[in-house]
Image (tube, grey):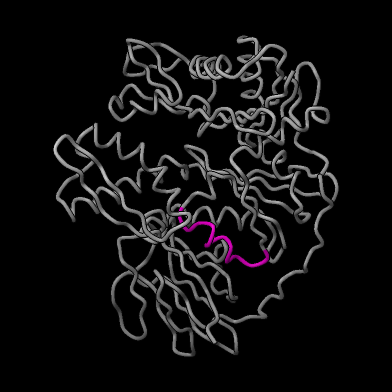
């Protein structure tokens, strides 16, 4: 008999047996009248038949009937049933039991519905645990632990606390920042690069679009170890290719990265030391790790894809058994919490420059105005249009030994996710966001 850990996230159902991954099935279904496809089979044809594809059935798990273009009256629960049933048939063995690792964004009624589906397909569930708590309770981390995960349609930050018992304390969600929109941004980046170089647009035909989306994860993985990647698409007549840099991918996703960084800032008190654990999906985003590593008082840890499911399986005795299974949101830590290195002294380091798109602009006694277009005086012109950014948005200046931002805008300037009320003092490592999603700038000190 074995205990299988199974993470339920719309990006993929990840199953682990004896510490090794045995399945990772994407939460996609294709409602083809000739037969329902789920998982990898659905992904392989989703761009060929986009009106028949759906991928919200785990994120919006419910019994309400949907009305897809295929004309089939099914509910999200029906599709989740088909997906989970296919997975269980491929990995389940006699005598196995399963521990579910679920995201903090999953409501209790949805957890109950998932348990009902598991019972219907004869999947024996011995326990249910918050996926972030399961993964992070294994870490030698600080007392405050943040976990950032990227789902298909949203991003979820889980805040946890505790010296010996790690307990989930808060969930923050970025509802429009998911893998799907970022993959779309990168697909258009690749398309534009190929058009400029070869006049071939891979998004113009379904077959080449499908090929592009299937290869995107491979190209993203390559960018984790190298600065550039060669992308190519084959047609019946020739191969089209282009070379792209990691920073181009990061720039294409800048509006989403800014919201992720704001999400991390919202998960802790100002100056508080914490460990930030990135799911494998978050860690795979080009240049995001480097951006997060630059935040002050954060220890960064990258989790393996199998971490939540493997940790859930290893905690079966602590989590269960119970009938029906109860969602566990606290677990004993494997390691005592690391000592707090102390809070950052507010104002101890004054920034000398603001960074925009890799270029440094000095902050001194002569006010630096930021906004759309040109203007009089020292001016940092932002390329527009940008949502929520004004023509004269804010001013940066050095006053009495401190770097200060003065806000002039209607829609706001934000320092580390908090809106500036008139003026605010800036510190090294702070992040300045103008507008929503707007544009993000970094504050640094240059000797």
Viewport quadrant of the N terminus: top right
* Residue 22 in which image quadrant: top right
What residue do we see at 50% from left, 67% from top? 432
Does residue 289 belong to the magenta stretch? yes
Q: Position of residue 142 (x, y in %)?
A: 76, 56
**Quadrant of the rendered image containing residue 250:** bottom left
Residue at 18% from the left image edge and 51% from the top image edge: 195
Q: Is residue 348 above or below residue 58?
A: below
**Residue 233 location in percent, x, y?**
25, 42
Q: Quadrant of the C terminus?
A: bottom right
In the rendered image of this protein, does residue 3 appear above or below residue 203? above
Q: Relative to the observer, which residue lies in front, 125 or 95?
A: 95
- Place of residue 435 in the rendered image (x, y in percent of width and height, measured from the top left): 43, 61
288 vs 255, left or right, is right
- The quarter of the displayed image where residue 34 is located: top left
Location of residue 240 with respect to 225 vertically, above or below? above
Nearer to me, 7 or 50: 7
Count all numbered tags in the image, as a single digit. Answer: 0
Say left or right for 257 vs 244: right
Q: Tell me the residue at 61%/51% (across/down).
A: 302
Q: Magenta residues?
A: 286-297
In magenta stretch: residue 232: no
Picture coordinates of residue 372, whole percent (x, y): 32, 69
Give the residue displayed 60% in from the left and 49% down from the top: 278
């Amino acid at each position: 008999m074995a205990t299988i850990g199974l993470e339920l996230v719309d990006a993929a159902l990840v199953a682990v047996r004896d510490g090794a991954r045995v399945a990772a099935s994407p939460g996609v279904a294709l409602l083809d009248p000739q037969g329902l496809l789920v998982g990898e089979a659905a992904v392989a044809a989703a761009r060929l038949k986009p009106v028949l594809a759906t991928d919200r059935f785990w994120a919006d798990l419910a019994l309400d009937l949907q009305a897809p273009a295929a004309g089939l009256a099914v509910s999200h629960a029906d599709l989740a049933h088909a997906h989970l049933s296919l997975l269980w048939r491929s990995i389940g063995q006699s005598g196995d039991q399963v521990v579910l690792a679920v995201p903090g964004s999953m409501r209790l009624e949805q957890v109950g519905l998932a348990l009902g589906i598991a019972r219907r397909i004869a999947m024996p569930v011995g326990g249910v645990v918050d996926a972030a708590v399961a993964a992070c309770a294994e870490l030698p981390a600080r007392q405050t632990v943040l976990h950032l995960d990227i789902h298909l349609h949203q991003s979820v930050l889980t805040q946890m606390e505790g010296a010996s018992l790690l307990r989930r304390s808060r969930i923050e969600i970025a509802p429009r920042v998911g893998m799907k929109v970022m993959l779309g941004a990168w697909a258009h980046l690749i398309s534009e690069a190929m058009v400029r170089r070869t006049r071939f647009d891979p998004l113009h035909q379904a077959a080449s679009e499908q090929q592009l989306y299937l290869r995107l994860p491979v190209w993203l993985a390559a960018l984790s170890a190298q600065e550039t990647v060669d992308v190519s698409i084959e047609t019946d007549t020739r191969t089209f290719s282009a070379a792209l840099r990691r920073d181009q991918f990061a720039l294409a996703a800048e509006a989403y990265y800014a919201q992720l960084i704001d999400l991390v800032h919202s998960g802790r008190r100002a100056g508080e030391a914490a460990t930030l654990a990135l799911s494998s999906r978050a860690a795979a985003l080009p240049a995001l790790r480097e951006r997060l590593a630059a935040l002050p008082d954060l220890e960064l840890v990258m989790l393996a894809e199998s971490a939540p499911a493997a940790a859930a399986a290893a905690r079966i005795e602590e989590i269960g058994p119970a009938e029906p299974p109860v969602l566990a949101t606290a677990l004993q830590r494997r390691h005592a919490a690391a000592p707090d290195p102390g809070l950052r002294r507010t104002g101890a380091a004054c920034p000398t420059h603001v960074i925009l798109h890799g270029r440094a602009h000095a902050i001194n006694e002569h006010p630096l105005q930021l906004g759309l277009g040109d203007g009089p005086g020292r001016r940092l012109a932002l390329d527009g249009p940008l949502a929520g950014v004004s023509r004269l948005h804010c001013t940066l200046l050095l006053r009495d030994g401190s770097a200060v931002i003065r806000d002039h805008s209607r829609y706001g300037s934000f320092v580390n996710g908090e809106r500036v009320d008139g003026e605010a003092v800036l510190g090294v490592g702070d992040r300045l966001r103008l507008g929503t999603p707007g544009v993000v700038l970094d504050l640094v000190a240059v000797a």
